Amino acid sequence: MTKKIHINAFEMNCVGHIAHGLWRHPENQRHRYTDLNYWTELAQLLEKGKFDALFLADVVGIYDVYRQSRDTAVREAVQIPVNDPLMLISAMAYVTKHLAFAVTFSTTYEHPYGHARRMSTLDHLTKGRIAWNVVTSHLPSADKNFGIKKILEHDERYDLADEYLEVCYKLWEGSWEDNAVIRDIENNIYTDPRKVHEINHSGKYFEVPGPHLCEPSPQRTPVIYQAGMSERGREFAAKHAECVFLGGKDVETLKFFVDDIRKRAKKYGRNPDHIKMFAGICVIVGKTHDEAMEKLNSFQKYWSLEGHLAHYGGGTGYDLSKYSSNDYIGSISVGEIINNMSKLDGKWFKLSVGTPKKVADEMQYLVEEAGIDGFNLVQYVSPGTFVDFIELVVPELQKRGLYRVDYEEGTYREKLFGKGNYRLPDDHIAARYRNISSNV
Ligand SMILES: Cc1cc2nc3c(=O)[nH]c(=O)nc-3n(C[C@H](O)[C@H](O)[C@H](O)COP(=O)(O)O)c2cc1C
């Protein structure tokens, strides 16, 4: 196998991302999340390790389902306090040259016109190193705080997301022609108004006449990620995503999602190879097996079951404080769910513990057998998990020819899909909005 593995660092602009309780670990620096130096140092570290991207998760509500209260989440810093991820990016871009930034933003709460402008701005400032992880998240507390009167059902949130992207594509791909900005000093023409177009979008959810406020950025449309594994979510991924962040930790589950999304993509006239698949992975690596186990035990000591129950409640809507261990949720007993949750075993993602060779073997196996293209690497301690990975696993992957030794030149899209591919390919649905002037 010669395919290079893409690796992103999985982060969030908060204290407790998904390893709840570990903020108390003596080596953990998560409390520094409000310090810009934490982020610039992290970005430089990741670039030293030749990472593809820093992937930033986000939520805009509180996990208040467990015990019908927000107290557990607030007390234990379960994704609260949580700051805005977009604000971090220009500083990190300033201290790096190649690292990309994949930022999560939900289509459920804020209007596409402002979001399209923020993404274009970041694509300019990063010189084409920005990606958007599209999610359709739903948290009741977010619905209330954003003043959402009519709460949409699951599948309709994806219908809205379809239209949200259509608006963004029209703004990014069609509103400004490539040569609209001419900077003609003699004739006092910065931009030729004939080459800036209204988009005249009128749909079920949005009315956006346009034009876009930004001139074309290096990638125009940011690299589109998607995360959401329901049937409707996979259909959405097949239509829009260039990268998919998959849930699942075993080969069978991952392979099912990969094959399913690639098959669906053909329906939209897309080359299935134009979609890169990412799995989450948790890595605890040591020079020896014993050293890795020692780290695992030290992490387990700080693991918080209560924190994970609060996260689970917010994510699924099930308040496990109301169930007995013999009750069932789907095909799993509540006792088993709680038992799984109490252990640091890679709840959502594959956990790989051991020597660099063992970790590299397991990563290689997942890539070869499930057909994935890369990983989002989960942290236990920050930045220690990434430091360990870069010092121990990266050289092992490089030795096997599975990981870049030097960065490729170009935008994030080019690093993923090859030189010259800085814009979306013609088989992507957004391409139809390119010549908007002749369509409207
Ligand atoms: C691997 C993975 C990561 C996700 N990360 C986020 C996130 O950071 N923020 C968020 O609001 N939702 C996140 N989601 C959930 C999405 O909000 C998704 O849109 C929602 O669960 C509905 O999708 P689904 O029912 O299709 O799975 C994630 C989902 C998956 C599978």
Image: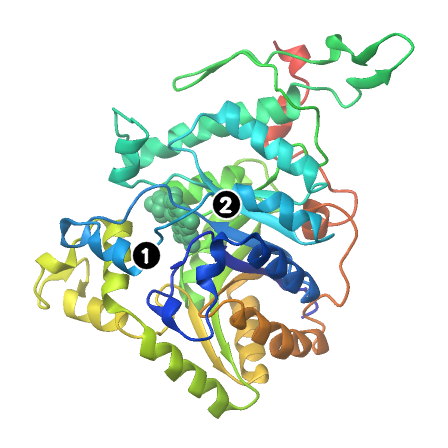
Position of the C terminus by quadrant: top right
Neighbour tally class for label 1: few under 14, some 14-19, many 20 plus, Cα within 10 Å: many
Q: Position of residue 73 (x, y in %)?
A: 26, 55
Q: Nearer the viewer, residue 194 or 297?
A: 297
Which type of secondary structure does the marked residue at label 1 adopt? loop
279 left or right, relative to 297: right
- Choose between 144 and 413: the one closer to the eye: 144
| 275 sits left or right of 321 in the view | right
Residue 67 position in % (x across, y down): 14, 54
Q: Amino acid at mark 1?
A: Val
Count of marks, rendered view: 2
Residue at the image point whose x is 47% and y is 43% from the top: 84
Residue at 49% of width from left, 26% of height from top?
112
The secondary structure type at the circle numbered 2 is loop
Mark pair 2, 1: CA separation: 16 Å
Which callout, 2 or 1, points at the residue further toward the start of the chain? 1
**Rendering coords of residue 194 (x, y %):** 74, 8
Q: Is residue 425 visible?
A: no
Which amino acid does the dot numbered 2 rest on? Pro
Identify the residue at image location x=43%, y=58%: 256
How busy is the neighbourhood of tag 2: few (under 14 within 10 Å), some, or many (20 plus)? many
Residue 48 spot, x, y in % from top left: 70, 65
In which quadrant of the rendered view does residue 319 lie? bottom left
> Residue 359 lies in what quarter of the image?
bottom right
Residue 47 in the image: above or below residue 435: below
Q: Which residue is mark 2?
A: 85
Q: Quadrant of residue 209?
A: top right
Label 1 beta carbon within 8 A of ligand 1: no
Q: Looking at this rendering, what residue extends furthest in the right direction?
A: 186
User: Which residue has dot 1 on it?
Assistant: 78
Q: Is residue 323 above or below residue 396?
A: above
Cβ atoms at labels 2 and 1 below 8 Å apart: no
